[in-house]
Amino acid sequence: MERKIITTGDGSKTIQILDWDEQYHSKHGAVQEAYHVFIKQGLDLFRDTEIGILEIGFGTGLNAFITLLESSSRQLTINYCGVEKFPVNDDELALLDYSTTLNAKSEHAVFQKMHEVPWEEIHKIHPNFSLVKRRMDFSEIRNRNEFDLIYFDAFGARVQPELWTEAIFSLMYAALKEGGVLVTYAAKGSVRRAMQAVGFSVEKLPGPPGKREMLRAKK
């Protein structure tokens, strides 16, 4: 499918899939969305501890990179697992230029390393941030009681409804520890009901710019 780099509402860039008219991040602001959904409503729940994070849709690495940058100030040790079936290519990563956008040029090599390290292996990317990237379909996840937090950042239900079903959320529920949390930009009623059907306690929260609501689910 044809792809292009676009500039979003906050000046940060993302990838648009033209055939779907769908973006990797919000067209209203890629960085703003990442901070609001995954940091403010997810990572902010954790301080001074060691946590495991599962990202559904590693994609551009933006969420992982922001999480790494935030981990030091929060005194968090993070074991991060990013699942992605179709990795972003090097040319696209260069054009996205997230280290400049995030005023983190000193960490540009770290961002590059996140994408360059081999898949299926655990790598120490930063003193308090370990990463394993898994190249697989989301339906193949079989972790049990392993993660404290899930960033659910799959493409929207409009274009990939099969990723927002009870079957997928059952796998997410199993992968979380008791008391673990899943956050997503989505707020559709069908998504909320699918989460509740597999046992999650779900709350609606104010959404990022351009979106009225989002969901947070707890095991």
Image: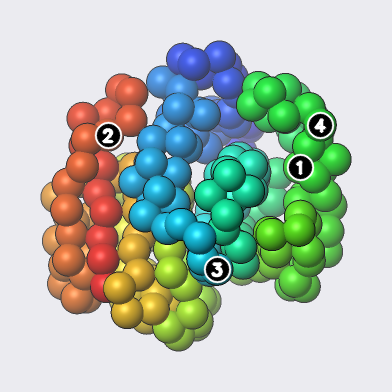
Task: Give the left or right position of residue 156, taking residue 54 as reference.
Answer: left
Callout 2–callout 4 Cβ contact below 8 Å: no
| Residue ID at (44%, 44%) | 39
Q: Residues within 10 Å of mark 2 (few under 14, many from 20)?
A: some
Task: Give the left or right position of residue 201, taking residue 169 as reference.
Answer: left
**Separation of residues labelled 1 and 2 (CA atoms):** 27 Å
Q: Quadrant of the N terminus?
A: top right
Is 39 placed above or below 54 here?
above
Is residue 76 among what the camera can see? Answer: yes
Q: Position of residue 103 (x, y in %)?
A: 68, 23
Label count reads 4
Q: Which residue is mark 1?
A: 111
- Considering only order in the chain, which callout, 3 or 4, is on the residue closer to the N terminus? 3
Callout 4–callout 3 Cβ contact below 8 Å: no
**Separation of residues labelled 2 and 4 (CA atoms):** 31 Å
Q: Closer to us: mark 2 or mark 4?
A: 4
Asked whether 4 or 171 is in front, the reply is: 171
Q: Which residue is mark 2?
A: 207
**Quarter location, residue 92:** top right
Q: Position of residue 8 (x, y in %)?
A: 51, 18
- Considering only order in the chain, which callout, 2 or 1, is on the residue closer to the N terminus? 1
Q: Residues within 10 Å of mark 3 (few under 14, many from 20)?
A: some
Is residue 166 among what the camera can see? Answer: no
